[in-house]
Image (cartoon, rainbow, N blue to C red):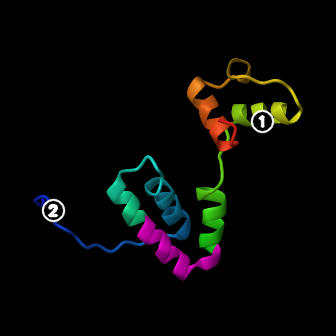
Amino acid sequence: MNLSLAFYTQWYWKTNLHNLMHFLSLRADAHAQYEIRVYADVMIDTLRRWTPICHDAFMEYRMGGAHLSKTGLAAVKRMIAAEKVDQKSSGLSPREWRELLAALGLG
């Protein structure tokens, strides 16, 4: 099954909403390749038309939400308790610290 470059293919698949939304969250991410992001955007629009309540929850919690590690959550709790927290005292790597601050709108 080898196709030359620039051929489109068609296929059918079976999936459930959970796995479809997981696939879309990966493919619609800003780090994904442009072409697959465009494809994911069209699929998200289809999800919106077919299952509007699931789409709204998906966009709110998965695409618009933030996922924190145990260590990241502990750092946020310390910040809420008015403790001075920096990257070194947080237990997070520099990259994780930057991502946490960006998710909180502080970086």
Q: Position of residue 65 (x, y in %)?
A: 65, 53
The kind of secondary structure the magenta stretch mainly shows is helix
Name the residue rendered at 68%, 22% in the picture.
87
Name the residue rendered at 42%, 64% in the picture.
40
What's under tag 1, amino acid-wise? Val
Cα distance in 3D space between marks 1 and 2: 47 Å
- In the image as oriented, which residue stretches furthest toward the top? 88
Quarter residue 41 falls in: bottom left
Name the residue rendered at 61%, 32% in the picture.
98
Ranked by sequence position, the earlier of labels 1 and 2 is 2
Vertical order, 76 against 38 (above or below): above
Q: Give the labeled residue for mark 2.
A: 6
Q: Position of residue 46 (x, y in %)?
A: 47, 77
Count of marks, rendered view: 2
Q: Which residues are magenta?
A: 41-53
What's under tag 2, amino acid-wise? Ala
- In the image, residue 21 lies in the stretch drawn in magenta: no
Q: Which mark is residue 76?
A: 1
Quarter residue 55 falls in: bottom right
The quarter of the rendered structure image containing the C terminus is: top right
Q: Which element carries disc 1, helix, strand or loop?
A: helix
Q: Is disc 1 surrounded by few (<14), some (14 to 19) or many (20+) residues within 10 Å?
A: some
Q: Which mark is residue 56?
A: none
Q: Is disc 2 surrounded by few (<14), some (14 to 19) or many (20+) residues within 10 Å?
A: few
Quarter residue 72 falls in: top right
